Structures are given as C-alpha cells and as structure tokens.
Image: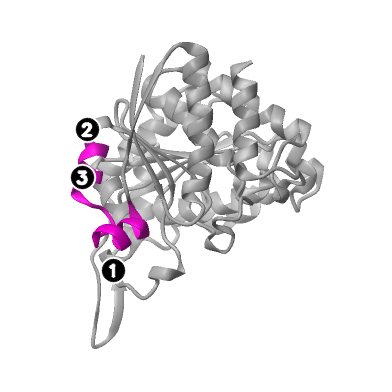
Amino acid sequence: MNINFTYVPGDGIGPEVGEAAMVVLNAMANKFGHTLEPEFHLIGGAAIDELGEPLPAETYASCEKTGAILLGAVGGPKWDHLKGADRPELGSLLPLRKNLNLYANIRPCKPYPALINKAPLKRERLEGTDFVVMRELTGGIYFGTKGRDNLGAYDECRYSEAEVERIAIKAFDLAMTRRKKVTSVDKSNVLETSRLWRETVIKVAGRYPEVELEHLLVDAMTMHMLTRAQDFDVVLTENMFGDILTDEASVLAGSMGVIPSASISDGTVGMYEPIHGSAPDIAGQGKANPLAMILSAAWMLRLSFGLDTEAAAIEAAVEAALEGGHTTGDLGGNLSTSQVGDWIAGHVQS
C-alpha cells in the first residue's frame, strides 16, 4: 500500500518527536511491504517565521488532499505577542479542524503497567483504568463569536442539535466495540447549551439499547475521574470541557508524553498528534519523549489506512520499550529522543 499523508512537525520539540515517529514508520513500511509517501509542510510558528502565516495555502492543500495529517506540536512563547488568528494555534489548528470537519477528538486513558508508579495517585486508583474521551472539537465556545466592547470581552458558546447528535453517535458506536457504557459530561444545571446536549444525547441513546448511559456534571466529573476511573468506558463531552478533562486524564496515565490523540471526521479523514505541547524549554536537546508521537502515527495507520496489524506492531514495540526502560529521562531511562525512536523501529522490524 502507498501510505500518503501530510507530515507537519510544527514547533519546539515537534520536529524531534516527529523525526522519531518517521523512523518508526519507515521501519513499519519495510517490515510490511508498504511505501511511505509523506508530504512535508510547515505549520504554526515555523510557518509564520518562514512564510509569514500559520497555515500556508500549500500546507492546507496537502492536508485536504491526503486526508491524513501527522502533527508534532504548535506554538510557543516566541509568538505570544501575536493576536487572534495570527497566533500559531488559533491560525492553524482551529481552521484545520473546522475546514476538514474534524469534529471528533479521541484520547485514550489506559495506564501502562510500567508507568503506574509514576502517576501521583495510588496504584489501586489506577489499575484497571481503560476509558476513552470522545470530545466534540469544532463547536462550542472556541468557535463562537468573540470580541470586546466598552463593557468588556465576550465568547459565545453555541451548539446545534446536529452537532451534538453526530458526536454522540461516534461515542455510542465506539462504546458498542468496548464495554457498552457512555458517560456524558455537561453542565446542564446552569448552561442552556448543556441542556440541549443532554436532551440530544438521551435521544441518541434510544438507538443503542445495549449501551448504558450515565450523566455527570463537569465539576463532579473532575472528582469522579480521580476516584473511580475504572468505572468509565467512553466519556462524551463538549469542546472546552473535553479540553480540560483530557489533560486531567493524562495524570492517570503517568505522563502526558505517552498519550496520542486522533481528531477525525467521517470516513478516513483525520489529524493525529500527541497531546503534549511544543515544550520549547527542552527543544533541540534530545530530551523530548517521542512515545506519544509514535503512538499517534500508529493511530493514523489504523484509522486513516485501516492497517490494524501494523498499528498494533508499533504499539507493542512502545509497550516493550516502557517495560524494558528504553525511554527518555522523564520516564526514568537514559536514551535520547532519536535513540528511543531507533529502538522502537528496531523492535518493529524484528
């Protein structure tokens, strides 16, 4: 198979973790007889510095054409003085999500046994945890009308029933392949958008009689996630709540450096990226943990190209690296970013 995708390493540690992922992808292609066809483009701050804008036309055209995007990281304090859509994140990630209809963001939370002792919670709070957050990604307060007037500043939060329905369907479809439970998180005691959210989720749930539906208010969920994480299967929530809850969930996994994410549309269109940021303070030092980026590449293979066996081979190699301590310093190892990539590539190929 020809694996044609858009590779946008981005800013900070993005190029370093991206290069490690590319080494692993090349090993996978050699092992399984595929041809890798990456299209390299600039995005975010790197694109601003080189081309004057965070999402150049040629970058977007490639993303639209391939429909599979592997992204390192975007942004950093270097560009904090910029405003609005001139900023790396607002000017690149949000337009990509909106224009490519990447409305479903998926983030897993399943602690690796080798990392449980690195998490701040007790082992008994973590063992058996295995849930996925399904976050609506193209609606809500991040995309609403915003501005300032003589009274202050405002950000509109708006959802349509259709927007809620389609993300709920994604969540229930996923739950049908797992333990058949959906926890819908909202703030329906206060927000009208959350009341619409809850009403619509209940309607969708009627089509899935085998799936248990649980409702939690977002403030309660922040507590329940830390005290009964094992009870959750698929967590469904809106954009801003999902942004916050998924970062909290990363604590359960022991490190943000091992969590991939997928932002998908209908069909095989998707953008794949680690949940961590650009970490400019360690950029260029070989200290960056590439595991989340490598796992994001595995998700790309699975969700955009249907290559389950190849994705599983990479995931098994990552688990072997963790079990054997073949990691960067943040996880207790003594390997550099590139050495971790080389080790995982070697495991995949063997």
Which residue, given by chain and number where applicable, does mark 1 sit on? Answer: 84
Q: Amino acid at mark 2?
A: Lys
**How busy is the neighbourhood of tag 2: few (under 14 within 10 Å), some, or many (20 plus)?**
few
Q: Could you say which is closer to the camera, residue 7 or residue 300?
A: 7
- Tell me the quadrant of the picture where the C terminus can be found: top right
Tell me which residue sits at (43%, 55%) in the image. Answer: 11
Disc 3 residue crowd, few under 14, some 14–19, many 20+, Cα 10 Å: few
Instruction: Determine whether 142 is above or below 179 in the image.
Output: below
Question: Do the CB atoms of the residues marked 2 and 1 lie less than 8 Å apart?
Answer: no
Quarter-of-image position of residue 192: bottom left
| Above or below, comparing residue 134 to residue 310 in the picture | below
Q: Amino acid at mark 1?
A: Gly
**Can residue 308 be seen in this snapshot?**
no
Q: Nearer the viewer, mark 2 or mark 1?
A: 2
The image position of residue 63, as x and y in percent, is 27, 38
The answer to whether residue 51 is visible is yes
Measured in 3D between alpha carbons, the distance from the residue under mark 3 to the one under mark 1, in whole angstroms, is 21 Å
Residue pointed to by mark 2:
65
Q: At x 22% / y 37%, what residue is drawn? A: 64
Q: In the image as oriented, which residue stretches furthest toward the top?
A: 33
Say which label, 3 or 1, has the lower sequence index: 3
Identified at 38% across, 69% down, the residue is: 79
> Magenta residues?
43-64
Query: Distance of mark 2 from mark 1, alpha carbons?
Result: 27 Å
Q: Residues within 10 Å of mark 1 (few under 14, many from 20)?
A: few
Spatial CA distance of label 2 from label 3 is: 10 Å
Q: Is residue 45 magenta?
A: yes
Q: Is residue 311 left or right of residue 198?
A: right
